[in-house]
Amino acid sequence: MSAPLKVGAVVITMGNRPEELRALIDSVAGQDGDRVEVVVVGNGSPVPEVPEGVRTVELPENLGIPGGRNVGIEAFGPSGRDVDILLFLDDDGLLAQRDTAELCRQAFAADPKLGIVSFRIADPETGVTQRRHVPRLRASDPMRSSRVTTFLGGANAVRTRVFAEAGVLPEAFFYAHEETDLAWRALDAGWMIDYRSDMVLYHPTTAPSRHAVYHRMVARNRVWLARRNLPAPLVPVYLGVWLLLTLLRRPSGPALKAWFGGFREGWATPCGPRRPMKWRTVWRLTRLGRPPVV
């Protein structure tokens, strides 16, 4: 029998939730099976006190969510190669069950083409999973597991070979859509992504718009995402659909102004290397229920 897959975990923190961070680390330490090594990255802030054996990295400045997670990846060697699987967990989350790491080992061992697993996020008080936390268009039943085309950034597991083949997260994004950028590149490299309702991270219900930069970043990074990854004919279609959806949601005046500012910024600034996905990947995304035009 082959040895169990090695699992590590990356947590980034701003240092402002020490009690929640400790509870998360304890939930990782309590996982069944072999020990999960944890690296906590202080993203421009000191790392609060952590248990013995937990590695820490303190960055002199905030590199954003993808930048901080990339530092965590490299803490496990180039592209994370010292382990087989990396868990990425929000510092105010909590693994709901003791078997999550073991379920990840089993899932990746059983399916050699599985590259990423997206966990279900549930409110610890109500057990409710927000619709936006189900990474597919048909999100009414969060208890249904399925193949998907993207994943949740703060509650997931990634086979480290994905980073070696598709690259790491796009640091310039700072916040928003970095997961979809990696997901599209992973799918284009032949990997698959699963949403698993039985792998649960407890996380308080929040609104993404609580971040002051939300509307600008969402719009800017949406443009960058398209410019970097889509075949040229799909770029205006994808962005046109999202422009229409944004208007239909009737955001406030200041929010809409910030959104259009970000949209313009996305066209006016460098987006990083352009590597358009193959048309067969477009077809794969379409068959999985989310063509890259929405």
Image (cartoon, rainbow, N blue to C red):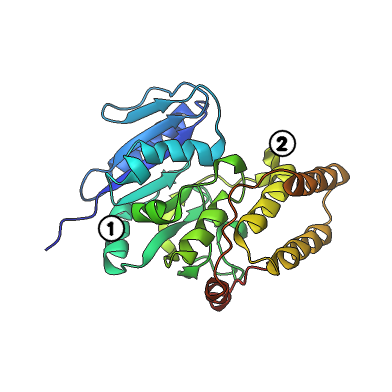
Query: Do tag 2 and tag 1 residues touch (Cβ < 8 Å)?
Result: no
The relative height of residue 46 versus residue 293 in the rendered view (above or below) is above
Q: Which residue is mark 1?
A: 105
Residue 99: percent from left, percent from top: 30, 54
Q: Earlier in the sequence, mark 2 or mark 1?
A: 1
Look at the numbered disc 1 and give the secondary structure of its residue.
helix
Horizontally, is 155 left or right of 110 in the view? right
Mark 2–mark 1 distance (CA, rounded to whole Å): 38 Å
Q: Is residue 70 visible?
A: yes
Q: Amino acid at mark 2?
A: Ala
Q: Residues within 10 Å of mark 1 (few under 14, many from 20)?
A: many
Horizontally, is 97 left or right of 20 in the view? left
Q: Is residue 174 visible?
A: no
Q: Which quadrant is home to the C terminus?
A: bottom right
Residue 148: percent from left, percent from top: 51, 67
Which residue is most to the left?
1
The relative height of residue 258 versus residue 63 in the rendered view (above or below) is below
Query: In which quarter of the view is residue 55 placed?
Result: top left
Q: Amino acid at mark 1?
A: Arg
Q: Which residue is mark 2?
A: 212
Look at the numbered disc 2 and give the secondary structure of its residue.
loop
